[in-house]
Image: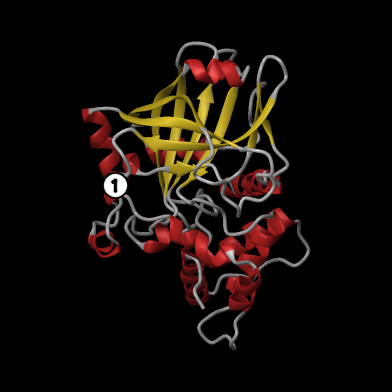
Amino acid sequence: MTVSRYAQAVVAGFTLALATGLPTMAQDASTAEQTIDVMNTLFGKHAGKRANHAKGVVAEGSFTPSPEAAKISKASLFQGPAVPVTIRFSDATGVPTISDGAANANPHGMALKFKLSDGAEMDVVVNALAYFPVATGEEFRDLLKAVSESGPNAQKPTALERFVATHPAAATAGKTAKTPSSLARQTYNGVNAFILVDKDGQRQPFRFKFVPVEGEEILPADEAAKRDPNFLMDEIGPRLAKEPARFRVLAQLAEAGDPTNDATKPWPDSRKTVELGTLTVTKAVPNSAEAEKALLFMPNALTDGIEVSDDPLIDARVQAYAVSFGRRSQ
């Protein structure tokens, strides 16, 4: 049975956990706590690091809105001049030493913190997956738990195989994310739906998409595996020192009948997209390892004119990120 690349990454983490004798998941805890517990079991506990997407690099840049954006949202982000943005690129898994070119490092992620003109902040969290393996926080916890019970000596069919049999997206989502030649040459998708609200109160469900202006450039798997373990993290700084990296920030607009509460179901490519603006990444921060410790990106940290949808994964992610952030300082 085919298993998603994400699940393969978790299996790799579980093998590491077995070797290091890490504790098992707590039984009496919230879904978010259980999710982070099992991530810590699969990937190990690494002081000061995130439970997932532990390896990353922080950069700075700006966002310039398009005229079209102001027409479909009253958000201040789209009404005025360019605003500063802090960006964190990352590898998947909670293993901070993972090789950038490993299959398990997919999907790569990009988290953004927009510094709005009124002094507030707005966060966006995207990754290279075209859609998510599961639809709810409980299902994500159960996927991780199934992996934790599916070690090399597990009886067939394993818990993971049984889970994938009833959750088809878990078997295919990981295949939609592959290793880029640069973190600046990857397309990053918003798998969760949000709502744009215009000045007249009209509401439009949408999903974010960040498309590199230079175009996406994907490496063959065998070539990616041969690259230096830190080739993506080491490349982005010198690249930005030569010239900024730019991304088209798009909103894919839902039509009637498109699900907004299920991140496993991508909307058709034929759906209209609107240019929200341009993200310009100008430099890597001098001390990324120190800078990222204080950063917390919350998918529900929005501004008037952009709202959460009925997608249950948004709240699940918020709660899990909060738990992970709390443990980073322990």
Q: Is residue 316 above or below residue 36?
A: above
Visible in this render: residue 116?
no
233 relative position to 109: left or right: left
Q: Callout 1: helix, strand or loop?
A: loop
| Residue 74 x, y percent position in the rendering | 63, 17
Q: Label 1, on which residue?
A: 217
| Residue 101 x, y percent position in the rendering | 32, 58
Point 54% across, 52% down: residue? 131
Outermost residue, left direction?
A: 242
Visible in this render: residue 291?
yes
Q: Is residue 149 above or below residue 41?
A: below
Label count reads: 1
Outermost residue, right direction?
A: 28
240 relative position to 46: left or right: left
| Residue 64 x, y percent position in the rendering | 44, 19
Judging depth in this view, the residue of 153 and 273 nearest the camera is 273
Tell me the crowding category of disc 1: few under 14, some 14 to 19, or many 20 or more residues within 10 angstroms, Cα based: some
Judging depth in this view, the residue of 310 and 26 nearest the camera is 310
Point 73% across, 42% down: residue? 310
Point 38% across, 59% down: residue? 98
Judging depth in this view, the residue of 6 and 78 nearest the camera is 78
Point 60% across, 35% down: residue? 206
- Label 1 is placed on what type of residue? Glu
The image's colouring method is secondary structure
| Residue 62 x, y percent position in the rendering | 42, 22
Q: Is residue 89 above or below residue 3?
A: above
Q: Quadrant of residue 176?
A: bottom left
215 relative position to 151: left or right: left
